[in-house]
Amino acid sequence: MRTRFEAHVHGLVQGVFFRHFTQIAAGKLELTGSVANQPDGTVLVIAEGSKDNVDKLLEWLKHGPELARVNHVDVEWVQPLNAQSDFTILR
């Protein structure tokens, strides 16, 4: 069963390679979607794939890479689109 979320990650998450390491984590989990810095200092992550692997990425986002300091993650579960074939870094 495929599932999809859109998550805003809050904290010290820009300038610490958060997007790069999120792309690597998503790739290992065979997820599609994107990650992008936002003007308000958050990082937006959109991920789609198997429920187990999407849940694993969400857990990873709560901590992020070594240099990040995640305060909290706002998650919205949305309808899967099956529109992407990879996981990309935007902005």
Image (cartoon, rainbow, N blue to C red):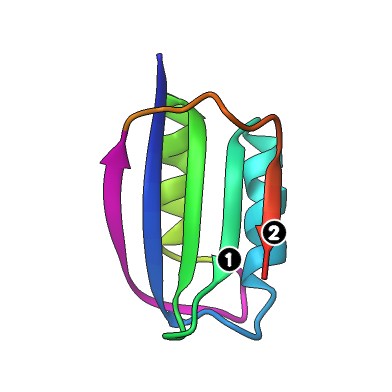
Residue at (63, 32) in percent of width and height: 84
Residue type, numbered disc 1 = Ala
Residue at (61, 81) in percent of width and height: 67
Residue type, numbered disc 2 = Ile
For disc 1, the neighbor class at 10 Å (few under 14, some 14 to 19, many from 20) is: some
Residue denoted by label 1: 36
Decide: is 17 above or below 50. Answer: below
Task: Name the residue furthest top.
Answer: 1
Task: Give residue 16's quadrant in the image.
Answer: bottom right
Q: Is residue 15 magenta?
A: no
Q: Residue 72 at x, y = what percent?
A: 31, 71
Report the side of 84 relative to 73 (left or right).
right
- Label 2: which secondary element: strand
Q: Is residue 73 magenta?
A: yes
Report the side of 25 relative to 41 (left or right).
right
Report the side of 40 relative to 26 (left or right).
left
In which quadrant will I find the C terminus? bottom right
Decide: is 74 above or below 59. Answer: below
Residue at (58, 58) in percent of width and height: 35
For disc 2, the neighbor class at 10 Å (few under 14, some 14 to 19, many from 20) is: some
If you read the primary sequence from the N terminus, does the residue marked by circle 1 or circle 2 appear first? 1
Residue at (65, 86) in percent of width and height: 15
Which disc, if any, is residue 21? none
Decide: is 3 above or below 13. Answer: above
Report the side of 77 relative to 51 (left or right).
left
Q: Residue 1 at x, y = what percent?
A: 40, 13
Q: Residue 26 at x, y = what percent?
A: 63, 43
Give the magenta range.
65-78
Q: What secondary structure is the stretch in magenta mostly built from?
A: strand
- Label 1: which secondary element: strand
Residue denoted by label 2: 89
Query: Cβ–Cβ below 8 Å for labels 1 and 2?
Result: yes
